[in-house]
Amino acid sequence: MMPMTPSEAKNIVVLGVQWGDEGKGKIIDVLSEEVDVLVRYQGGNNAGHTVIAKGEEFVFHLIPSGLLRPGRVGLLGNGVVIDPAVLIEEMQLLEARGINTVDAVKISDQAHVIFPYHKRLDLAREASGDRRIGTTGRGIGPCYMDKVARMGIRIGDLIQPEALAEGLKQNLKEKNRVLETSYGEKPINFDELFAEYSEYAKVLAPHVVNGSLLLREAMDANKKILFEGAQGTMLDIDFGTYPYVTSSNATAGGACIGSGVPPTAIDCVIGVLKAYTTRVGEGPFPTEFSEGMMEEIRTRGNEFGATTGRPRRCGWFDAVIAKHSVWLNGCNSVAVTKLDVLDGLESVDICVGYRLGNETITHFPSDLKTLNACQPIYETMPGWQGATSDASCLEELPPEAQTYLKRLEQLIGIPVSLISTGSAREQSFKTACW
Ligand code: GDP
Ligand code: IMO
Ligand code: MG
């Protein structure tokens, strides 16, 4: 059977295939024109997804990036970890800019809640210097730890005062012990915390739903659904560069687990990839630039974190990683972003394999020790001198840029279905295989 194209598909996953910040927000905003329901399925406000529409910039942390379009429903699935203060602020900011969140935002009662002790433990552990990951400090890892340890407090508990009180009392005993004895920090007061979160509960309660049921009913009603990945495949807790990863499954499999739909419901997966590579935080990065080129691409691409403002590490396109991610996620096609950032370079390198001792490998190693021993093997392609940002179809791109994209397609084995050449909504076009 031929794979579905994005326009034929009903239920699409859109996710990053590198280390995040591929431009998922922009691509999802473009695609949301054709979609009824948008679902975030993992991560939390460690994500920062930028959308530029009608000259205005919006940065989404928890709310799905497609909600600028009126009439859409945006679900935060059970796989998401939610800091209520951040979610409420995000909704209020959008409302103030004329975007309806009152009817649009739905929250799964099975999603887990981030509390101040999660953030404090995240920051304290990072500050201790032991195995520093370079996290966003938003309490993501500690919240997922509680989920897996079966001591998490879910949104469904948050909105029931007795369940919230009981959960917090139990958890604070342990959390305060760790904060005080391991990190020498002040304990958290139950009454103050309970009072603060009870107020959040009142605001969020009208948005709380059975997420899986909402999606089942949407599918029965023949609605088109887009599942939005946060982070990127290389930050996946299982398949990324562990331990330098985030604490959830950013890969396509996570879309089912994190929202409550069966794998057979997904009929198309689109990978978003930058024409080069970036990552934020610690961890291996085989194609990372050295100083001069790092500065140049960081400045051209404005590569600073949308959540923490940290400078992003930049490097050449790594086809080993891209091919690995494409397979792992079952991508049908990819959207290539930020092609314009490479405009005017004399030449452009692509990593086509890794040198490992006397061997050449083209698969991504599953352990860090092997990955750290790998040296990238580059293929150098001619750069292009014209601007790509005004192109409205493939043929309008400079010939060398077309050749670059064709080579990427060859290396990753699937077609490019969408090309983005600027941050604005209009600066993108679909190719014939859309
Ligand atoms: P996300 O986390 O994957 O949604 O990506 P971010 O929003 O964190 O980072 C992508 C950045 O690149 C944002 O500032 C976007 O506005 C910008 N961007 C997206 N697509 C393009 C593009 O094609 N060209 C340029 N120059 N910028 C882009
Ligand atoms: P979007 O969705 C880039 C990185 C952090 C750190 C690691 C673990 O915008 O692509 P965490 O706070 O999740 O425990 O940090 O993961 N990280 C991201 N890097 N983009 C993101 O999100 C990220 N979310 C987390 O920098 O290295
Ligand atoms: Mg981002």
Image (cartoon, rainbow, N blue to C red):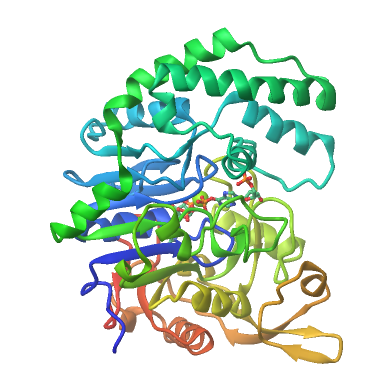
**Total numbered labels:** 0
Tell me the residue at 80%/91% (across/down): 359
Tell me the residue at 61%/64% (across/down): 234
Q: Is residue 409 visible?
A: yes
Relative horizontal placement of residue 415, taking residue 246 as reference (left or right)? left
Q: Residue furthest top?
A: 191
Q: Residue 169, image x and y in percent? A: 59, 18
In the picture, residue 220 is in which quadrant? Answer: bottom left
Q: Residue 434, image x and y in percent? A: 27, 77
Q: Is residue 261 above or below residue 331?
A: above
In front here: 228 or 316?
A: 228
In front here: 200 or 404?
A: 200
In front here: 145 or 62?
A: 145
Tell me the residue at 37%/49% (across/down): 51
Q: Is residue 425 visible?
A: no
Q: Residue 274, image x and y in percent? A: 51, 67
Relative horizontal placement of residue 45, taking residue 2 as reference (left or right)? right
Q: Is residue 354 above or below residue 98?
A: below
Q: Residue furthest left?
A: 221
Q: Residue 329, image x and y in percent? A: 48, 72
Q: Is residue 143 above or below residue 162?
A: below
In the picture, residue 283 is in which quadrant? Answer: bottom right
**Figure quadrant of the N terminus:** bottom left
